[in-house]
Image: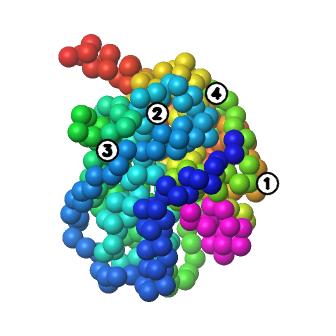
C-alpha cells in the first residue's frame, strides 16, 4: 500500500532524535567512558497517537485495523518510544549513528487504549563491550492513566568498534537458517521502497533504509529493511493465520535480527512458526524459505494459552 507523506509531519520528535545522532557522528561521543549502569530512568508523557497513522501502520504491516479497534498495536512502540530511548544514550562513549538494531523482547501486560496520552519510562540497562563491539540493552515501559505499565519493551542493539587489532579471525559461525520443522504461514512481498514507507510511518528516516549510496557506504549492497518492520509483519501474519485475527492473543515476543534484510528490487518474506508449547510460546522465524537464510529468529507468545496455563497452576 502507498503510505501518505502527511505522516512525515507527525514524526517531529523521532526526526529530531535522528538529527542528534547525526550530530554525534560529526562531533564524536560526548563522554570518553561508559556511564554508571543501569542509568537513570527518564519519564515523559506524549499525546495520543494519531488515528490515521495507527490505521495505516496496521494496514502496511498486513493487519486488519478493525481487529485493533480501540487500541494501539504494541509493535508501533518505536514511533513513540525512540525519542526517549535516544535520550538514554546521550552519555555513551560511542557514535549514535553506528548503533544497529539486534532485536527486542516485548511483553504485553494490557492493551494500550487508543485516544489516551502515553506515559513513558525509559532506561539504559546495560552495556557489554568486547574488542569488536558494544552490546546495548535499553528498556521502555509504556502505559496510560487507565493502564499503567501496559507494555514492556527491551531493545537490544550493537555498535561495531574499531579495535585496531589485526591478526587471524576465528572460524565463522554458520549463518542462521529457517528450520525445516517450522510451518510456513504465508509470504509478504516488500518492494524496494519499503524502507521509506516504514520511515514515513515511524519517523525512523535513517538513510541506510532508503538511500542507496548511503547504504553502500555503510557496507550494504542496497538499503535494508528496518528490523521493527520485519517484526511488525511477523506479528500481523501470526495474528491473522494462527489466531484468526484475535489481537488480544498477542502476549509478546523475544526475537533477534540475524542478518540484514537487503531490499534490492524487492523481496519475499516468509513467516514460519513451530507448535505451541504449554505456555503458548512458539518458535518464530522470518526468512527466504525452509533451509534458506533467516532474517529473524525467536519466539512469540499466545497470551490466552499463557493465561490458561497460569490459571491451571494457580
Which quarter shows the C terminus?
top left
Q: Earlier in the sequence, mark 4 or mark 1?
A: 4
User: Which residue matches tag 4?
Assistant: 185
User: Which residue matches tag 3?
Assistant: 117
User: Which residue matches tag 1?
Assistant: 265
> Counting other residues with Cα less than 10 Å from the Cα at mark 2, is it few (<14), some (14-19), or many (20 or more)?
many
Residue 111 in percent (x, y) is at: 35, 31
User: Which residue matches tag 2?
Assistant: 300
Name above or below for residue 284 compared with residue 306.
below
Task: Determine contact: label 3, label 1, CB under 8 Å.
Answer: no
Q: Nearer the viewer, mark 4 or mark 1?
A: 1
Name above or below for residue 156 compared with residue 59.
below
Find residue 149 and report its image quarter: top left
Q: Earlier in the sequence, mark 2 or mark 1?
A: 1
- Nearer the observer, 227 or 202: 202
At mark 4, the secondary structure is strand
| Numbered range of the magenta stretch | 205-220
User: What residue is rendered at 55% in x and 18% in y?
Assistant: 244
User: What residue is rendered at 39% in x and 41% in y?
Assistant: 106
Residue 256 in percent (x, y) is at: 49, 49
Amino acid at each position: 500500500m502507498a503510505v501518505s507523506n502527511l505522516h512525515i509531519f507527525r514524526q517531529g520528535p523521532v526526526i529530531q532524535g535522528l538529527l542528534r545522532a547525526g550530530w554525534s557522528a560529526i562531533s564524536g561521543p560526548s563522554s570518553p567512558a561508559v556511564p554508571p549502569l543501569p542509568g537513570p530512568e527518564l519519564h515523559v508523557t506524549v499525546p495520543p497517537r494519531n488515528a490515521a497513522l495507527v490505521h495505516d501502520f496496521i494496514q502496511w504491516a498486513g493487519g486488519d485495523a478493525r481487529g485493533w479497534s480501540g487500541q494501539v498495536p504494541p509493535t508501533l512502540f518505536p514511533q513513540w518510544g525512540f525519542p526517549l530511548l535516544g535520550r538514554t544514550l546521550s552519555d555513551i562513549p560511542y557514535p549514535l549513528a553506528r548503533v544497529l538494531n539486534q532485536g527486542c523482547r516485548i511483553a504485553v501486560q494490557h492493551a494500550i487504549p487508543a485516544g489516551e496520552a502515553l506515559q513513558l519510562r525509559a532506561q539504559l540497562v546495560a552495556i557489554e563491550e568486547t574488542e569488536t563491539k558494544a552490546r546495548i540493552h535499553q528498556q521502555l515501559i509504556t502505559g496510560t492513566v487507565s493502564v499503567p505499565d501496559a507494555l514492556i519493551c527491551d531493545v537490544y542493539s550493537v555498535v561495531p568498534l574499531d579495535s585496531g587489532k589485526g591478526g587471524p579471525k576465528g572460524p565463522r559461525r554458520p549463518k542462521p537458517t529457517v528450520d525445516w520443522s517450522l510451518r510456513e504461514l504465508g509470504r509478504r512481498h516488500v518492494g524496494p521502497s519499503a524502507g521509506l514507507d516504514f520511515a514515513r510511518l515511524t519517523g525512523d528516516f535513517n538513510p541506510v533504509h532508503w538511500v542507496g549510496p548511503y547504504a553502500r557506504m555503510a557496507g550494504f549492497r542496497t538499503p535494508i529493511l528496518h528490523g521493527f518492520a520485519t517484526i511488525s509483519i511477523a506479528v500481523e501474519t501470526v495474528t491473522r493465520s494462527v489466531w484468526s485475527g484475535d489481537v488480544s492473543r498477542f502476549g509478546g515476543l523475544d526475537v533477534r535480527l540475524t542478518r540484514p534484510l537487503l531490499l534490492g528490487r524487492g523481496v519475499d518474506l516468509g513467516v514460519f512458526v513451530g507448535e505451541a508449547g504449554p505456555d503458548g510460546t512458539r518458535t518464530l522465524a522470518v526468512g527466504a524459505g525452509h533451509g534458506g537464510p533467516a532474517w529473524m529468529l525467536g519466539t512469540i507468545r499466545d497470551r490466552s494459552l499463557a493465561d490458561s496455563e497460569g490459571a491451571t497452576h494457580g
